[in-house]
């Protein structure tokens, strides 16, 4: 069971009708993803990355073939069943964060839990645990407009992980972030993957994201043309290079460390999982 595929696509085809002709967005895609993968779909614009993530995320269904996610055939699910699969097992992270502006950080992260019937006390515990992961426990009462881009994406990560999904799908999660913030969110996602075994699948053009991947799948014109394991020798080297670049670009931010120590927020000083009373 440990090695069973969490996600499997079989001869997956997605065709969009375009007036008199058809646009083949995915062309016989056969892929397996196992628990704990940290994988990315790469390839030129229009190659089918988002289409594939949307089908695997049961937001869309295939024209032909099959996508089996946690034992369920996406193409056979009703709208309600697809929603249930997403709500219980899949977290999404998007390029544009998609936070609800009128709600606080806490409420944005709490939102997926409202659909799952948790008690208020349980919701508070889970939300604060998720905010601890992304080092934003001290911003629970802020609203999205008061956050930087990097902080906004960290809230979106917290929202994606709060229900402890098996799978996180991240479509261009760093596209609106500078290098420093990109590494911040990537390190958080890598840590989550390593400590919780959550499977991550990215769609990306970003070399910084690619430097963290342990598996890189290249799509061209809707076909998988390469599926590479990123070897441990190669990966840290690429990552170190990307980090050095980010550090060179990063502005010094005096006072930040002291503040982090005072609040116990950024830096996560072992409070993960037990911060229910900090709101
Ligand atoms: N709803 C739709 N209707 C018609 N065509 C679509 C639709 N969604 C996507 N396509 C087409 O399917 C192809 C694959 O699109 P997709 O968004 O998956 O590409 P992508 O690899 O994610 O590109 P990018 O890197 O620009 O995000 C493109 O040619 C696109 O125009
Ligand atoms: Mg896309």
Image: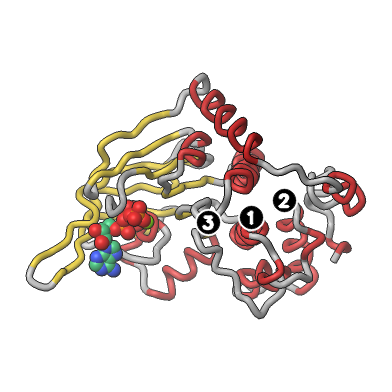
Disc 2 to disc 1, C-alpha distance? 14 Å
State the image coordinates of residue 103 (x, y, percent, origin top left): 68, 77
Q: Which residue is mark 2?
A: 133
Q: Assign a secondary structure to mark 2.
A: helix
Q: Is mark 3 within 8 Å of ligand 1?
A: no
Q: Assign a secondary structure to mark 1.
A: helix
Which residue is at a point 40% across and 36% down the rendered structure image? 216
Front in this rendered view, residue 228 or 4: 228
Write down the quadrant of residue 125 in the picture.
bottom right
Left or right: 110 with respect to 241? right
| Quadrant of the picture in which ligand 2 is shown | bottom left
So how many labels did they put on this image?
Answer: 3
Q: Residue furthest right?
A: 262
Q: Is residue 119 visible?
A: yes
Q: Earlier in the sequence, mark 3 or mark 2?
A: 2
Q: Residues within 10 Å of mark 1 (few under 14, many from 20)?
A: many
Dot 3 and dot 1 residues touching (CB under 8 Å): no
Write down the quadrant of residue 24 in the picture.
bottom left
Closer to the observer: label 3 or label 2?
3
State the image coordinates of residue 258 (x, y, percent, origin top left): 90, 46
Q: Earlier in the sequence, mark 2 or mark 1?
A: 2
Q: Residue furthest top?
A: 233
Q: Which residue is mark 3?
A: 176
State the image coordinates of residue 106 (x, y, percent, origin top left): 73, 69
């Amino acid at each position: 069971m440990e090695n069973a595929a969490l996600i499997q696509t079989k001869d997956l085809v997605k065709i969009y009708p375009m007036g008199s002709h058809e646009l083949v967005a995915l062309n016989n895609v056969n892929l397996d993803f196992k628990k704990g993968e940290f994988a990315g779909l790469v390839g030129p614009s229009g190659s089918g990355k988002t289409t594939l993530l949307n089908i695997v995320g049961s937001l869309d269904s295939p024209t032909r073939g099959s996508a089996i996610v946690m034992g369920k055939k996406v193409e056979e699910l009703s709208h309600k069943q697809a929603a249930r699969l997403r709500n219980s097992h899949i977290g999404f992270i998007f390029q544009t964060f998609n936070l609800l502006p009128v709600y606080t950080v806490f409420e944005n992260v709490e939102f997926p839990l409202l659909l799952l019937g948790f008690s208020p006390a349980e919701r508070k515990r889970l939300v604060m645990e998720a905010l601890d992961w992304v080092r934003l426990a001290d911003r629970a009462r802020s609203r999205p407009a008061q956050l930087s881009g990097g902080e906004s994406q960290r809230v979106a990560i917290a929202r994606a992980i709060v229900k402890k999904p098996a799978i996180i799908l991240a479509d261009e999660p760093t596209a609106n972030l500078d290098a420093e913030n990109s590494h911040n969110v990537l390190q958080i996602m890598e840590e989550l993957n390593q400590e919780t075994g959550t499977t991550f699948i990215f769609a990306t053009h970003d070399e910084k994201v690619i430097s963290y991947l342990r598996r890189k799948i290249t799509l061209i014109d809707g076909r998988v043309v390469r599926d590479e394991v990123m070897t441990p020798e190669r990966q840290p080297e690429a990552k170190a290079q990307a980090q050095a670049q980010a550090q060179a670009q990063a502005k010094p931010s005096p006072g930040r460390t002291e503040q982090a120590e005072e609040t116990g927020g950024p830096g996560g000083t072992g409070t993960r999982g037990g911060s229910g009373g900090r709101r």
